[in-house]
Image (cartoon, grey):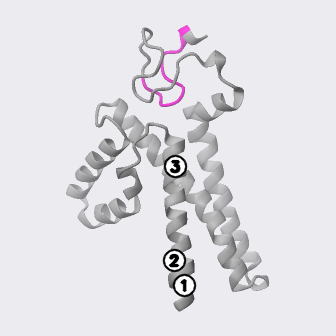
Amino acid sequence: MTNQRKNCINCGGPLDRSKEKCIYCGTATDFETKKKITLVLKNKKFRITGLYPILIGMGIAIVLNIYLFAFNNLSETQLVGFTPLWFFLIIFGLYGYFAEFLMNRIIDGKGKNIPDAYNKWVAEFVKRHLFIGLVLALILSPFSFIKTRNSLLVAFTGSVIWGILLLIFFMGIFPAL
């Protein structure tokens, strides 16, 4: 089964049959020894068509439920308490999609790792759309220093960073408003 595989299940890059690991993401090409949950999470197609959309959908469903149906029944403290949950789910999904996009850029030779691919993408985007590019560069700034080729880890780390910023906002700035 492994010998028939032409592309890495994790990043989608072409496999070199003489290597034990994918040259783009470092994933082992022998998936027979992996546990089933690892196989599922390492599957790029599952992440793009299943995991990330489900997480974004769950986050949006929570937001809609809170603000359309339960808003009058919740205190301000409860509303603030639910925000990190839906925020994390949505950011994780969006960051996951963008990490997959950057991995595709690495495979296409437009970067050697996530920060390199991100910095090159930002430079190209800012040339075409200055204001939007600068805003996106700020929002997506965690990609400039997360040095891994694992899109799940990049999405998780970016979500945690934004979660910490949200916590700082709720603990430091929000009470003063």
Q: Is residue 1 left or right of residue 162?
A: right
The residue located at (37%, 50%) in the rendering is: 145
Q: Earlier in the sequence, mark 2 or mark 3?
A: 3
Q: Are marks 2 and 1 in contact (CB under 8 Å)?
A: yes
Q: Dot 3: within a 10 Å radius of its alpha carbon, few (fewer than 14), some, or many (20 or more) residues? A: many
Where's residue 175, x and y in %?
A: 57, 88
Residue 140 in picture, x, y percent from top left: 40, 57
Q: Residue at x 61, y 10 (%)?
A: 1
Whether tag 3 and tag 1 are in contact, CB under 8 A, the answer is no
The answer to whether 177 is drawn above or below residue 113 in the figure is below
Between 160 and 15, which is closer to the camera in this rendering? 160
Q: What amino acid is at disc 1? A: Phe
Q: Nearer the viewer, mark 2 or mark 3?
A: 2
Asked whether 60 or 161 is in front, the reply is 161
Please give the residue where the numbered disc 1 appears in the rendered image: 174
54 left or right of 108?
Answer: right
Question: Going from the N terminus, do you reach mark 3 or mark 1 first?
Answer: 3
Residue 4: quarter of image:
top right
Please check the rendered image and state whether residue 111 is part of the magenta-colored stretch, yes or no.
no
Residue 5 on the magenta span:
yes
Q: Is residue 24 above or below residue 16?
A: below
Q: Amino acid at mark 3?
A: Ala
Q: CA distance from mark 2 to mark 1?
A: 6 Å
Can you name the residue that lies furthest to the right here?
Answer: 73
Q: Is label 2 in contact with label 3 (beta carbons under 8 Å)? A: no
Residue 39 percent location from the top left of the image: 64, 28
Residue 177 in view here = no
Q: Residue at x 53, y 71 (%)?
A: 166
What are the residue bounds of the magenta stretch?
3-13
Disc 2 target residue: 169
Tag of residue 155: 3
